[in-house]
Image: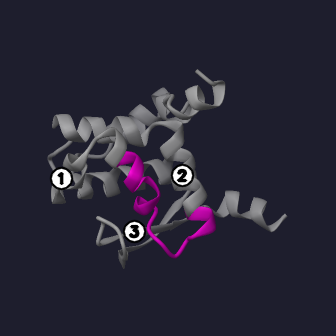
Amino acid sequence: MNRTIDYLFTRNNELASEAFAAYIGSAPDKFGTGGSAINRAIFDVLCLNICVNAVITHVLVRPDVPPVVAVEHILAALVGDEAFSDDAKQFTGWRIRQIVEFLGGRWVRAGVRVRGSRFRTGSIYRMPEAARLLAA
């Protein structure tokens, strides 16, 4: 397979670290759903480079739109319709928040309406350190 494709479908190095494991391990599973097979599959997909790159790029380019829309089609293709139950969507948003914050982003606001998506609402974020790259 092509090296670029291999890279995209490999777990992100930052999220494969012990530091990330400790970071997410320190937060309780506030939805009580982390142990389900679907949520494990969602989390595995969210940690792939393709999703991490999509989320971070989305936060930088469209900071007014929740980044869950950036991974919606990837989740549909790799996990299936099960990724869009109400519980699974909450779990997805929670894990995206953990990923963005671990990578240097900060949460701005929850409950932002989303149009044309299986996600009705989501949170928005800012990436202050990375945003300066766009200004260059």
Rendering coords of residue 78 (x, y %)? 34, 39
Number of the label disc, if any, that sits on residue 112: none
Instruction: Give the residue number, with chain letter if any, for mark 3.
Output: 123
Q: Is residue 68 magenta?
A: yes
Question: Foreground: 3 or 122?
Answer: 3
Q: Outermost residue, right direction?
A: 136
Q: Residue at x 19, y 47 (%)?
A: 82
Disc assigned to residue 31:
1
Q: CA distance from mark 3 to mark 2?
A: 15 Å
Q: Position of residue 35 (x, y in %)?
A: 17, 36
- Is 119 above or below relative to 22? below
Residue highlighted by disc 2: 54
> CA–CA distance between discs 3 and 1?
16 Å
Q: Amino acid at mark 1?
A: Phe
Distance Cα–Cα, label 2 vs label 1: 24 Å
Question: Looking at the image, which residue is at 40% across and 60% down?
Answer: 68
Q: Amino acid at mark 3?
A: Ser
Question: Which image quarter: residue 1?
Answer: top right
Structural crowding at the residue carrying mark 3, measured as other residues with C-alpha within 10 Å and reported as few (<14), some (14–19) or many (≥20): many
Residue type at the position of mark 2: Ala
Q: Residue sitting at 54 percent across and 52 percent down?
A: 54
Q: Is residue 5 above or below residue 90?
A: above
